[in-house]
Structures are given as C-alpha cells and as structure tokens.
Amino acid sequence: MTTDLEIYARPTPDAAFLVLFNRLAVALRLMDPDEGTVGVYFDVLRDLPATALEAGADALMKETGRRFFPSTAEWRTAAEVALTRQRQRALEPDAEHDPRAWVCCSRCLDTGWILAEDGGSLKCSGVLRNGTCQCGRRFPHEAGMTYTEACSCRASNVNWQRKNRTREKHR
Ligand SMILES: [Zn+2]
Ligand SMILES: [Zn+2]
C-alpha cells in the first residue's frame, strides 16, 4: 500500500550520487550542502545515467568563470550534452575500440612469425644442440644470426587467419 507520505517523500540519494555531488560541491565551494538540497538534486537528475551525470559535473567544474554550484537545470543540461556525446561515440567506434584492430597474439603480433622482444627478428644463440643451432644452421657460427619461427597461435589466431586466407586458398 502506498501512503501520501511515500508519494511526496524524496528518494534517498544513492552512494554514487552523493560522491559525485560532494566532489562538485568541493570543486565549486558549496558550503555545507544539507541533506534536503542533495535530495532535490537527486530527484531531478536520477533518471540520467551516472556516467552522464559525472561527465556533466566534470564539464561544469572545468567551465571557465564558473564560481557557483550549478542549478539542477544547469547540471541536467550539462549531463544531457555529455550523454549525447557518449551515444555518438558509441555509434562511431574508433580504431582503438574496433575489435578488428585488436592484436590476438603478443608473441607474433598476428604476423604468424615469432618476434624478438624488441619487435625485430629473432636472433640465435649460436649454440649447436645435437649439431643444429636454433636458427637451423648445422655448422659453427657466431651468435646473432636472424631466423624465423612460425608462431603456434596460427591454428587459433583469427587475425592471422583472416590475413592469410587468400594465400591458403591458392596453396
Ligand atoms: Zn602468434
Ligand atoms: Zn644460429
């Protein structure tokens, strides 16, 4: 059963909102915000996502010439602007967030060939084991000869497979 009191009671600000409100209050030197004030802001702004409220608060803090705590309407506007921007960004993913740009294997950076730690070619130790160096040479030689080694990720590396699909077909 809902009583009149419950209808008119302000919702209790959640912890995340309190943190945000206090941060903004400190930044804009709002002295002693009482519980009622926080409640009013929460009531007006709570339908907006926390990320938008936070981005809106950040924008207000950085606003040139702002000295006073924003009104509920100002914060709401700033949050809505931030929300629109966040949605636009979600619609046009940049290279950084493009799953196709992800590197599957850090050992070969999806080239299919293992890379040295500096990103260059592998260089051998020049040590013969059972007559063969890791570079494949079967005669004594100095260390530091370059060699290649196929990366074991090929069977599961979708990026490498995509790049090498055409080549595989013609084999
Ligand atoms: Zn690999
Ligand atoms: Zn070697």
Image (cartoon, rainbow, N blue to C red):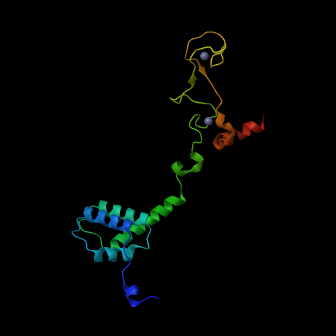
Relative vertical location of residue 93 with respect to residue 118 in this rendering, above or below: below
Nearest to the observer: residue 147 or residue 59: 147
Relative vertical location of residue 44 with respect to residue 3 in this rendering, above or below: above
Observer able to see residue 115: yes
Instruction: Give the number of marks.
Output: 0
- Quarter of the picture for ligand 2? top right
Residue 111 sits in quarter: top right
Q: Position of residue 127 (x, y in %)?
A: 59, 14
Nearest to the observer: residue 3 or residue 78: 3
Nearest to the observer: residue 9 or residue 155: 9
Relative vertical location of residue 100 with respect to residue 29 in this rendering, above or below: above
Q: Position of residue 126 (x, y in %)?
A: 58, 14
For the view shown, which residue lies furthest in the front direction? 1
Q: Residue at x 27, y 66 (%)?
A: 25
Residue 49 sits in quarter: bottom left
For the view shown, which residue lies furthest in the left direction? 31
Task: Tell whether 22 sits left or right of 90.
Answer: left
Task: Tell whether 28 sits left or right of 135.
Answer: left
Q: Position of residue 77 (x, y in %)?
A: 38, 71
Which quarter of the image is occupied by the C terminus? Answer: top right
Q: Residue at x 34, y 64 (%)?
A: 19
Q: Position of residue 66 (x, y in %)?
A: 26, 65
Q: Residue at x 29, y 77 (%)?
A: 36
Observer able to see residue 65: no
Relative vertical location of residue 63 with respect to residue 4 in this rendering, above or below: above
